[in-house]
Image: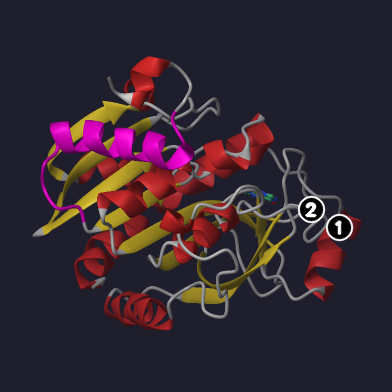
């Protein structure tokens, strides 16, 4: 009898293995790149070649995405000759999920054998040199969510108890993005992403605090996923779409509709950048 049939006895590792088996049954190719598509940026997955879409509801261990603008499915397919798995919609801590639930898909990517993880998000611009609609390569992060996704029981099959975080966002991946953006004549920013748990947007005082701490952009995701990927030895690329300037920077209130609209406005450029970069992530 399988553990799952004995009712609730599976370890986290076994639950992840279970999800991996389900995915392999539907998509037997060797998946090399995992992608998480943030708010308003999900359209990239629609362009994958020979794709297979699996709703999160069909995948054991996956929670349900509850936020508007997140489709809630895993799309597997090709970008050129590279097989990728793309999440259209992610799980956020502010939705009430535990960190184990938030990062379950990332661990699934890890056991599925991905070598690279591309994390994308919508973020507020803190650096006053940024404009709405800019794309920012994440070169480091500040985890201000109050807790690490690795807190709790440790299973060494996922990696070390105290993983190194000195280069979370692979430098060579950042350079690939810079090169491709140059070819596209696209101006890119580069900076530090601060993650807060949300879901309220920040106050102007919090935004000033974040700027003092060295943050260039602020959001409510990505950091837990990046930490878990690094524990598993997966290389990470992070790209933020600056959907709005953070509270108090230009004195305009922030709303989710605006965040989604900006994502939609830049999504062609964003898709083109990903289409060029992904085959080079080796
Ligand atoms: N703050 C936090 N998260 C965000 C923002 C913001 O201004 N914009 C998009 N996601």
Residue 181: quarter of image: bottom left
Is residue 1 highlighted in magenta?
no
Q: Residue at x 83, y 56 (%)?
A: 248
Q: Nearer the viewer, residue 8 or 224?
A: 8
Q: Looking at the picture, does residue 1 appear above or below residue 27?
A: above
Is residue 30 highlighted in magenta?
yes
Is ligand 1 closer than 8 angstroms to the Cβ of mark 2? yes
The quarter in which the C terminus is drawn is bottom left
Residue labelled with disc 2: 247
Badge 2 density bin: few <14, some 14–19, many ≥20, Cα 10 Å: many
Q: Which mark is residue 251?
A: none
Q: Looking at the picture, does residue 29 appear above or below residue 33?
A: above
Determine whether the residue tagged by mark 2 lies in a helix, strand or loop.
loop
Q: Earlier in the sequence, mark 2 or mark 1?
A: 1
- In-image side of 135 versus 44 (left or right): right
Residue labelled with disc 1: 206
Q: Looking at the picture, does residue 64 appear above or below residue 94?
A: above
Q: Residue at x 38, y 65 (%)?
A: 234
Residue 71: quarter of image: top left
Determine whether the residue tagged by mark 1 lies in a helix, strand or loop.
helix
Q: Are marks 2 and 1 in contact (CB under 8 Å)?
A: yes
**Residue 3 percent coordinates (x, y):** 36, 25
**Residue 65 percent coordinates (x, y):** 49, 28
> What residue range appears in magenta?
10-31
- Report the Cα–Cα distance between label 2 and label 1: 9 Å
**Residue 261 percent coordinates (x, y):** 51, 41
Which numbered mark, 2 or 1, is in the foreground of this view?
Answer: 1
């Amino acid at each position: 009898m399988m553990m799952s049939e004995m009712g609730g006895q599976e370890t986290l590792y076994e639950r992840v293995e279970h999800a991996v088996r389900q995915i392999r049954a539907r998509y037997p190719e060797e998946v090399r790149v995992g992608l998480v598509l943030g708010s308003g940026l999900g359209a990239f997955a629609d362009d994958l070649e020979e794709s297979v879409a699996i709703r999160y509801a069909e995948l054991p261990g996956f929670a349900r995405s509850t936020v508007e603008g997140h489709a809630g499915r895993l799309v597997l397919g090709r970008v050129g000759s590279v097989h990728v798995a793309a999440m259209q919609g992610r799980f956020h801590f502010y939705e009430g999920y535990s960190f184990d639930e938030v990062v379950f898909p990332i661990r699934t990517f890890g056991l599925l054998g991905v070598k690279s993880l591309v994390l994308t998000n919508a973020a507020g611009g803190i650096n006053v040199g940024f404009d709405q609609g800019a794309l920012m390569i994440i070169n480091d992060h500040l985890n201000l969510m109050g807790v690490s996704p690795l807190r709790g029981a440790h299973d060494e099959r996922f990696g070390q108890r105290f993983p190194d975080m000195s280069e979370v966002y692979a430098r060579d991946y950042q350079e690939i993005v810079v090169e491709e953006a140059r070819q596209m004549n696209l101006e890119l920013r580069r900076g530090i992403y601060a993650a807060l748990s949300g879901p309220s947007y920040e106050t102007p005082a919090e935004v000033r605090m974040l700027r003092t701490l060295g943050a260039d952009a602020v959001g409510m995701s990505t950091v837990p996923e990046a930490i878990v990927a690094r524990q598993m030895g997966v290389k990470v690329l992070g790209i933020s779409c600056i959907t709005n300037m953070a509270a108090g920077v230009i004195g305009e209130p922030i709303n989710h509709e605006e965040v989604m609209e900006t994502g939609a406005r830049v999504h062609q450029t964003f898709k083109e950048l990903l289409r060029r970069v992904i085959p080079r992530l080796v």
